[in-house]
């Protein structure tokens, strides 16, 4: 009989978590994530995992607007762990088990993971965070060059002498047409 009661309790708990969107996978340039039931107190004994994925070549910036968890000096009760990737083997970017808004967190890749764990005792409001996509300088240069390549027929990156062309390996910089700021000559094919 005790096994049946325990089984029903676990089933009911799982059903409640399903209703309250405990965990999940998100993608897109920006969005928000909250603990189940936020801003109402979160449930006891839950384990939620969210994975946020943004465009390749970029990273995820996580900004908290609220964090209210059961305080614990060792984070042994309720806690939120942020990982630099999608699984438990990914490096930890931070573990939080208190109140107050942590500083922004940025992943090193286009994926960040959140793990929310609660015990059977006290609870708080939980957390609310927003994510945005952060593009690297390399990604921005690729977009600009791709934009010109698509709009201008026969567009070729300039190469050669007198500011016409070359190989660019910097993370940032300015690419201009030959003889900028004057008008470029007709028929020039720089590579």
Image: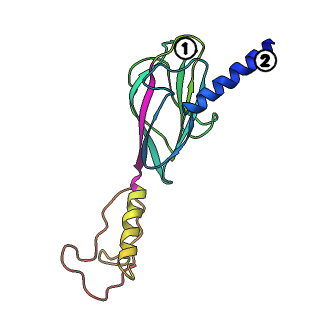
Residue 124 belongs to magenta span:
no
Query: Which of pointers 2 and 1 lies earlier in the amino acid sequence?
Result: 2
Is residue 22 visible in the rendered structure shown here?
Answer: no
Task: State which quadrant residue 163 falls in.
Answer: bottom left
Is residue 64 visible in the rendered structure shown here?
Answer: yes
Which residue lies under the disc numbered 1?
74
Mark 2, other Cα within 10 Å: few <14 / some 14–19 / many ≥20: few
> 11 or 59: nearer the eye?
11
- In the structure shown, which secondary structural element does the residue marked by tag 1 occupy? loop
From this view, report whether residue 95 is shown above or below residue 190.
above
- Residue 38 is situated, as x and y percent measured from the top left of the image, at 45, 26
From this view, report whether residue 33 is shown above or below residue 143.
above
- Residue 61 is situated, as x and y percent measured from the top left of the image, at 42, 40
From this view, report whether residue 6 is shown above or below residue 56.
above
Residue 128 belongs to magenta span:
yes
- In the structure shown, which secondary structural element does the residue marked by tag 2 occupy? helix
Q: Residue at x 43, y 42 (%)?
A: 31
> 100 or 45: nearer the eye?
45
> 25 or 152: nearer the eye?
25
Which residue lies under the disc numbered 2?
4
Task: State which quadrant residue 20 falls in.
Answer: top right
Camera-near label (2 vs 1) is: 2
- Left or right for 155, reference 53: left
Query: Distance between the Cα atoms at labels 2 and 1?
Result: 35 Å
Please, which colouring scheme is shown? rainbow
Task: State which quadrant residue 154 falls in.
Answer: bottom left
- Residue 43 is situated, as x and y percent measured from the top left of the image, at 55, 20
**Do the CB atoms of the residues marked 2 and 1 lie less than 8 Å apart?**
no
From this view, report whether residue 186 is shown above or below residue 180.
below
Magenta-colored span: 125-137
């Amino acid at each position: 009989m005790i096994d049946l009661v325990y089984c029903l309790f676990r089933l009911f708990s799982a059903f409640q978590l399903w209703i309250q969107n405990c965990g999940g996978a998100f993608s897109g340039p920006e969005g928000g994530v909250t603990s189940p039931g936020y801003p109402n107190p979160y449930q006891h004994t839950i384990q939620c995992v969210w994975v946020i994925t943004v465009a390749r070549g970029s990273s995820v910036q996580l900004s908290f607007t609220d964090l209210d968890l059961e305080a614990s000096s060792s984070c042994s009760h309720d806690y939120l762990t942020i990982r630099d990737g999608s699984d438990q083997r990914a490096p930890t970017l931070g573990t939080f088990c208190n109140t107050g808004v942590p500083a922004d967190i940025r992943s090193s890749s286009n994926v960040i993971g959140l793990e929310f764990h609660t015990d059977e005792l006290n609870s708080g409001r939980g957390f609310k965070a927003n994510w945005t996509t952060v593009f690297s300088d390399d990604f921005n240069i690729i977009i600009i060059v791709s934009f010109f390549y698509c709009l201008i027929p026969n567009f070729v990156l300039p190469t050669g002498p007198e500011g016409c062309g070359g190989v660019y390996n910097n993370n940032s910089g300015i690419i201009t047409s030959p003889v900028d700021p004057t008008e470029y000559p007709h028929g020039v094919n720089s590579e």
